[in-house]
Amino acid sequence: MDIRKKYAEFETQKYGKSWTREQIMQGFVGDVGDLMKIVMTKEGIRESGDGDTHQRLAHELSDCLWSVLVLADQYDVDLEKAFLGTMEELDKKINNEEYKK
C-alpha cells in the first residue's frame, strides 16, 4: 500500500487528484489485457514484442496481483480470509461425489 500511496501523491501532483477506485479497476483491466497479449505470445499465436517474454509475463502478473491487492484494500476486503474461504469452498466442491462423475 506504500506504493499505492506514492502513486496517489504523484497523481495528485500531475492531475490534481488521485485515481478513484473505478479508475484503479480500469487500470487493472488494462493490465489484464497486457497479460493476455503476453500469454498469446508465450503460446505462439502472437508475435513477440521487445524483451524477454518470460520476464514480461512475470512483470505483468505482478502488476495484476498488485491491482487486486490495492482493490481489496480500497474496498475493505480481508483478502487473506476471503481467499482461504474460497479455497475451502473449491476443495469441498472438487471432493463432492457429484462433481467427480
Image: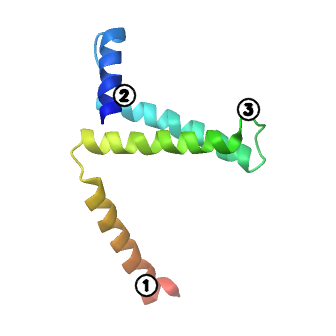
- Nearest the viewer among 54 and 21 is 54
Q: Amino acid at mark 1?
A: Asn
Q: Amino acid at mark 2?
A: Gln
| Element class at badge 2 | helix
Q: Secondary structure at mark 1?
A: helix
Taking the spot 24% from the left edge, 50% from the top edge, the residue there is 77
1 and 2 marks in contact (CB < 8 Å): no
Q: How is the image coloured?
A: rainbow
* x then y, percent, for residue 97: 44, 89
Q: Which label is found at residue 49?
A: 3
**Above or below for 96 versus 49:** below
Disc 1 from disc 3: Cα separation: 42 Å
Image-quadrant location for residue 83: bottom left
Quickly name the residue at label 1. 95
Find numbered disc 3 in the image and state the secondary structure of the residue it sits on. loop
- Residue kind at label 3, given as amino acid type: Gly
